[in-house]
Image: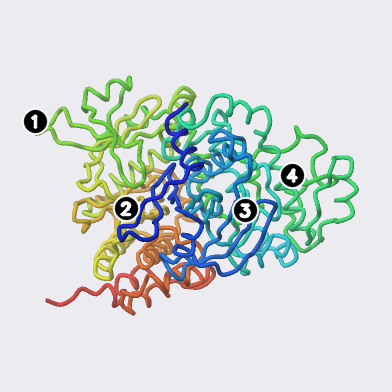
């Protein structure tokens, strides 16, 4: 059997006792398996030393669910699901019950990327008789059933948009939830700002249907061919999830939970007795119900249901995400014009931009000697470490590989290894970094770009540390955070002064140039926009209309919002104070727990730009980038 799979399964089924160094009580053995932190307990009596049970919140046939406090990181609250091993578990690591849990944990830890709308598993505890699964806490007082009653125009679109987008991410990674119902969509609190999908115990996984892969996951290393085939036969249907979304949408629009009928013959009668509330929602919401809802509101046959991509581009869904809508418009309308990437490259070469055209991808090795993959905190398998063959000092560089969207051969073979980018986004990144922006010490330097029929290769200096800001967060102090945030804010101001809005600032896109983690540089301008109205100056007489055209300029002025970068700065500052790149909505607990060493002025700035509810709500005014850079927390100490 496959070694990774066997090790993980045996770890789940066996217990191991490590004697205490003091000769007393045995202590738990801790390790990480399949990306999940796991502990083997000497007995169930070890649990109270790790977690304090606050209350029981639910129970089932063979499991109980508790709210607990993490004693390693108080006062953080988590949800603990306690599963009792029954006689089926005694059959060994390849029993049906074990394989079911095995797949669920793999889906949550390795197959799917971390997502804000999926409840994350934090730790698994294993004893001889029980398994304890600790995950993000969601309020049982805030259920989808309750949300149905209070949903309005804004909140209904916000939550359903989140659901559609997270289901699309699942399907892109070959995962089908197959049990998407009201009691498996929870909320962290009764504000109903964000939902979390839970319970992947019935989910199917079909890697052949995946169009994306997380962190280089290789299904053949974790599953047998028979298991993957059985999912295709029994349960791998995107339509099941789409119909489930339709039933949830019906509940939102009619204002109450309607039990799913046992058979299709009952569907028409049951749902017909609970019509949607007219006039309470946008017309586009009712239109979407016609496309995915249960009968008599939705399609009469399965072949009439739209795909998840079509659903996510529906006007009601896109209306809630103007940013994504405009970016999609830019790609859809302008990529076709630049589909001939080598021709585009020839035009840029004529303007002095150092782009090389490759007639074959093998020509890449004529310019650069391959040393292997660069390993960073972001698991960038698409980043190669190379030597410049034209440099006598054998200077080492990094090469980012992207697949050109629209190239069937490249997509078929490589889309699971490398990010897929439209010709438009490739061209935009090149022009922004090389033409619109002057060279800056805290912006990634592009040494060259090589383009072929199927790929684009971005050549940059090789970072000494290979670390990103995500690696720094747990080490953050007031002093180090202040220095780095000052660099970041001033660099964002520099970009805005030259008309560039990054639109995708996050810890993984901020690299450290040095091993001491004192100097940063901003990377990944694939979603950036040039907005002429924002620019206060130009670099070398840069004329955006010459390079982008009037259609781009009109859309970019709506898409490229400086507030998006300021909101991103607020999330990064919050992450520094919390020591966590994805603190979720448990803002106040993490805030109070982790931010004790930061100056009051750091909190003052966070109140101005941080994520709601700490910072301003989405419709409230934010600090400008100048106000951020001039804030007293970032003032340099006088020598």
- In the displayed structure image, the side of residue 385 where residue 339 appears, left or right: right
Residues at circles 1 and 3 in contact by the CB criterion of under 8 Å:
no
Q: Which of marks 4 and 2 is nearer the N terminus?
A: 4
Q: Earlier in the sequence, mark 1 or mark 3?
A: 3
Q: What's the CA distance linking mark 1 and mark 2?
A: 30 Å
The image quarter containing residue 404 is top left
User: Which residue corresponds to mark 2?
Assistant: 510
At 37% from the left edge and 32% from the top edge, which residue is drawn? 344
User: Which residue corresponds to mark 3?
Assistant: 161
Q: What's the CA distance linking mark 1 and mark 3?
A: 54 Å
Picture quarter with the C terminus: bottom left
x, y (%) of residue 422? Answer: 45, 36
Residues at circles 4 and 2 in contact by the CB criterion of under 8 Å:
no
Q: What's the CA distance linking mark 4 and mark 2?
A: 40 Å
Q: Residues within 10 Å of mark 1 (few under 14, many from 20)?
A: few
Helix, strand or loop at label 4? It is helix
Helix, strand or loop at label 2? It is strand
Q: Earlier in the sequence, mark 3 or mark 2?
A: 3
Residue 451: mark: none
Q: How crowded is mark 2: few (under 14 residues within 10 Å), some or many (20 or more)?
A: many
**Front-most of residues 127 and 247:** 127
Q: Which of marks 4 and 1 is nearer the N terminus?
A: 4
User: Which residue corresponds to mark 1?
Assistant: 392
């Amino acid at each position: 059997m496959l070694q990774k799979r066997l090790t993980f399964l045996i770890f789940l089924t066996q217990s191991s006792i490590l004697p205490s160094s003091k000769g007393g009580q045995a202590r738990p053995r801790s390790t990480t398996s399949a990306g999940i932190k796991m502990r083997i307990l000497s007995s169930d009596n070890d649990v109270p030393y790790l977690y304090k049970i606050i209350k029981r919140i639910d129970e089932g046939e063979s499991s109980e669910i508790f709210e607990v406090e993490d004693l390693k990181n108080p006062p953080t609250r988590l949800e603990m699901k306690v599963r009792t091993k029954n006689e089926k578990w005694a059959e060994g690591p390849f029993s049906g019950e074990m394989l079911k849990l095995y797949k669920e944990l793999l889906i949550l830890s390795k197959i799917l990327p971390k997502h804000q709308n999926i409840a994350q598993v934090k730790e698994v505890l294993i004893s001889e008789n029980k398994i304890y699964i600790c995950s993000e806490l969601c309020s049982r007082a805030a259920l989808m059933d309750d949300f149905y009653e209070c949903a309005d125009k804004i909140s209904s679109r916000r939550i359903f948009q989140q659901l559609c987008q997270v289901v699309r991410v699942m399907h892109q990674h070959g995962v089908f939830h197959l049990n998407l119902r009201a009691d498996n969509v929870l909320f962290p609190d009764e504000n109903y700002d964000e939902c979390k999908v839970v319970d992947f115990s019935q989910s199917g996984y079909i890697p052949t249907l995946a169009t994306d892969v997380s962190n280089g996951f290789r299904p053949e290393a974790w599953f047998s061919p028979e298991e993957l085939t059985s999912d295709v036969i029994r349960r791998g249907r995107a339509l099941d999830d789409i119909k489930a979304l339709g039933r949830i949408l019906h509940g939102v629009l009619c204002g109450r939970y309607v039990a799913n009928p046992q058979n299709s013959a009952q569907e028409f009668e049951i749902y017909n007795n609970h019509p949607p509330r007219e006039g309470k929602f946008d017309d586009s919401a009712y239109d979407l119900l016609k496309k995915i809802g249960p009968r008599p509101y939705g399609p009469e046959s399965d072949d009439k249901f739209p795909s998840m991509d079509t659903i996510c581009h529906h006007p009601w869904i896109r209306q809630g995400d103007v940013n994504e809508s405009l970016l999609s418009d830019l790609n859809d309308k302008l990529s076709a014009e630049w589909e001939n990437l080598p021709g585009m490259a020839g035009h840029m070469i004529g303007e002095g931009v150092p782009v090389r055209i490759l007639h074959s991808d093998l020509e890449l090795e004529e310019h650069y000697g391959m040393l292997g993959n660069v390993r960073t905190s972001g698991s960038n398998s698409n980043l190669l470490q190379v030597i410049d063959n034209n440099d006598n000092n054998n200077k080492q560089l990094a090469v980012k590989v992207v697949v050109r969207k629209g190239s069937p051969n490249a997509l078929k073979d490589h889309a699971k290894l490398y990010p897929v980018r439209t010709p438009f986004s490739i061209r935009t990144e090149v022009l922004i970094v090389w033409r619109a922006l002057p060279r800056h010490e805290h912006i990634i330097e592009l040494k060259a770009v090589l383009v072929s029929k199927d790929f684009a290769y971005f050549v940059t200096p090789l970072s000494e540390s290979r670390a990103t800001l995500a690696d720094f967060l747990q080490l953050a102090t007031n002093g180090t955070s202040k220095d780095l945030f000052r660099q970041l804010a001033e660099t964002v101001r520099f970009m805005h002064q030259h008309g560039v809005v990054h639109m995708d600032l996050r810890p993984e896109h901020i690299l450290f140039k040095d091993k001491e983690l004192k100097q940063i540089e901003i990377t990944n301008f694939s979603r950036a926009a040039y907005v002429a109205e924002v620019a206060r100056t130009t670099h070398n007489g840069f004329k955006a209309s010459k390079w982008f055209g009037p259609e781009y300029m009109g859309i970019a002025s709506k898409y490229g919002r400086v507030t998006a970068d300021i909101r991103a700065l607020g999330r990064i500052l919050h992450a520094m104070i919390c020591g966590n790149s994805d603190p979720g909505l448990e803002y106040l607990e993490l805030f109070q727990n982790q931010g004790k060493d930061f100056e009051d002025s750091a909190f003052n700035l966070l109140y101005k730009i941080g994520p709601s509810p700490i910072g301003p709500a989405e419709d409230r005014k934010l600090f400008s980038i100048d106000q951020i850079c001039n804030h007293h927390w970032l003032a340099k100490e006088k020598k």
